[in-house]
């Protein structure tokens, strides 16, 4: 009985080219990446043929969800803090260190001022859920400016170069947009960017 | 003999195991791929008139009636238009059209004014020629220059000699029943048709009467 000898082969695969390619890919992604800013609600923007790019800095994002809930935020954390300080001082709300820490971690402002402190007391996990049911009210306070207007004014004071970008869901009722726009117009904020998707020719 | 001795020296295996490194890189790539936004969102520049009454009165320029189109955006993706100024007593002046190239765009392009001209078609023609010029010039024409000429064309200077033709004015009136998408689409049409003068206006009492006569629902219950 002859034993069948299986030749033992060295199954070493050269990984170097693969690792080369991966390094390239990694470099590419690291250099081109701008991180997604987390948004409290998911919105599907309508598409348009406009090709203007949104500037990266100094943008005040106004997010409007399909139910007409309004959130504001800007990518600059210092501006956000200045806005918060400004508005809370005005309405006599004092926040403790934990609340301010929670505020720093939050991407957008969406709580009405009456619940602002309570909201910031919540655990960060809970905050994400709760904020979806909130939204900044646009009703005027005693015939004066609304909370929404106060936030925009505070943003303008924190950074005078700030540009307003409205990001709204395609299905949002025009009624809400009208309210937002006319409140902005009342404050002489007449230039906005409407954030849209680029329409591809196949959608024509 | 000496040769043999040399070769006896133990050869070190210089192959390094790359697998852990590759594993780690895979993870990093996955992380970056999931966390990035490659395409920056597009935006649309919109300038609204001020609510300040004082300013509005000064800005109001006289436009001939036939150089105006009023577009009403209604719910359920319906769109109506009035060529010329609305006759508030006559619901027949409102006509229904559809979205897209065969609907509202067609209406805008083929709108003939009292002077027998088609300003939108003329302006679009001028824009096509400008685009051709830009393509032919290549890098020689800067974006700034192109934008300058484009805005001149949009304001009516289609021959490039400073003589302006009267252009169309479009008034967009979205109703409360319309949605945001309708508004963006309407603004899109303005851009496609190179209309320089357009405004988003509110539905006023006269419009409400007219729409009721026509039987169009303009408010949310």
Image: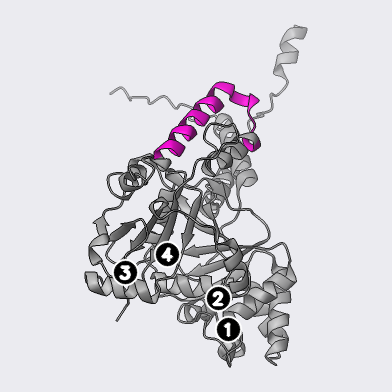
Task: Indicate the quadrant containing the N terminus of chain A: top left, top right, bottom left or bottom right.
Answer: top left
Query: Which of pointers 3 and 2 indicates the residue nearer the eye?
Result: 3
User: Of the numbered discs in the image, which one, if any, rests on residue A169?
Assistant: 4
Question: Of marks 4 and 1, which one's residue comes earlier in the chain?
Answer: 1
Nearer the N terminus, badge 4 or badge 2? 4
Q: Residue furthest right?
A: B2
Q: Which residue is mark 1?
A: A146
Near-viewer residue (B125 or A82): B125
Q: Chain of mark 1?
A: A
| Disc 4 chain ID | A
| Depth order, front residue of A24/A52 | A52
Q: Marks 4/1: CA distance? A: 22 Å
Query: Considering only vertical position in the picture, is A94 above or below B101?
Result: below
Magenta residues, start to end = B121-144
- Residue that label 2 marks: A183
Q: Is residue B74 magenta?
A: no
Query: What's the magenta bit mostly, secondary-structure-wise?
Result: helix
Local SS, label 3: loop
Disc 4 element: loop
Would residue A130 appear left or right of B208 to someone viewing this image? right
The reply to whether dot 1 and dot 2 touch (C-beta < 8 Å) is: yes
The answer to whether residue B126 is magenta is yes
The color scheme shown is one colour
Are the numbered discs 1 and 3 placed on the same chain, yes or no? Answer: no
Cα–Cα span, label 1 and label 2 = 8 Å
Residue at 36%, 42% in the rendered image: B109
Q: Residues within 10 Å of mark 4 (few under 14, many from 20)?
A: many
- Horizontal side of A169 relative to B94 (left or right) equals right
Q: CA distance from mark 1 to mark 3?
A: 35 Å
């Amino acid at each position: 009985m002859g034993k069948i000898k299986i030749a033992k082969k060295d199954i070493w695969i050269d990984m170097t080219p693969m690792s080369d390619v991966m390094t390239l890919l990694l470099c590419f992604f690291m250099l081109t990446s701008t991180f997604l800013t987390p948004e409290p609600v998911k919105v599907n923007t309508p598409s348009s043929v406009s090709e203007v790019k949104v500037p990266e800095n100094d943008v005040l994002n106004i997010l409007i969800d399909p139910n007409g809930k309004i959130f504001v935020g800007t990518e600059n954390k210092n501006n956000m803090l200045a806005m918060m300080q400004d508005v809370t001082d005005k309405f006599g709300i004092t926040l403790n260190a934990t609340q301010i820490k929670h505020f720093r971690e939050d991407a957008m402002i969406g709580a009405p001022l009456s619940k602002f402190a309570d909201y910031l007391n919540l655990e960060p996990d809970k905050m994400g859920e709760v904020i979806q049911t909130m939204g900044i009210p646009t009703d005027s306070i005693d015939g004066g400016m609304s909370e929404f207007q106060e936030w925009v004014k505070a943003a303008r004071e924190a950074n005078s170069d700030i540009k307003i970008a409205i990001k709204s869901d395609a299905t949002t009722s025009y009624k809400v947009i009208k309210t937002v726009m006319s409140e902005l117009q009342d404050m002489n904020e007449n230039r906005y960017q409407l954030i849209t998707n680029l329409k591809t020719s196949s959608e024509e | 003999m000496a040769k043999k001795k040399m070769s006896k020296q133990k050869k070190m295996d210089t192959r390094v195991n790359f697998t852990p490194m590759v594993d780690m890189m895979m993870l990093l790539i996955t992380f970056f791929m999931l966390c990035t936004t490659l395409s920056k969102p597009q935006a649309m520049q919109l300038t609204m008139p001020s609510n300040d009454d004082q300013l509005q009165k000064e800005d109001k320029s006289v436009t001939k009636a036939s150089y105006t189109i009023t577009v009403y955006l209604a719910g359920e993706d319906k769109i109506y238009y009035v060529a010329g100024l609305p006759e508030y007593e006559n619901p027949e002046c409102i006509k229904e059209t559809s979205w897209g190239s065969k609907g509202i765009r067609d209406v805008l392009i083929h709108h003939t004014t009292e002077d027998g001209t088609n300003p939108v078609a003329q302006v679009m023609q001028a824009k096509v020629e400008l685009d051709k010029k830009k393509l032919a010039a290549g890098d020689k024409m800067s974006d700034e220059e192109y934008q300058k000429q484009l805005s001149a064309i949009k304001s009516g200077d289609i021959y490039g000699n400073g003589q302006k033709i009267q252009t169309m004015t479009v008034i967009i009136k979205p109703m409360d029943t319309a949605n945001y998408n309708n508004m963006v689409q309407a603004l899109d049409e303005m851009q496609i048709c190179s209309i320089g003068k357009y405004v988003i206006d509110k539905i006023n009492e006269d419009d409400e009467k007219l729409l009721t006569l026509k039987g169009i629902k303009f408010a949310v219950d």
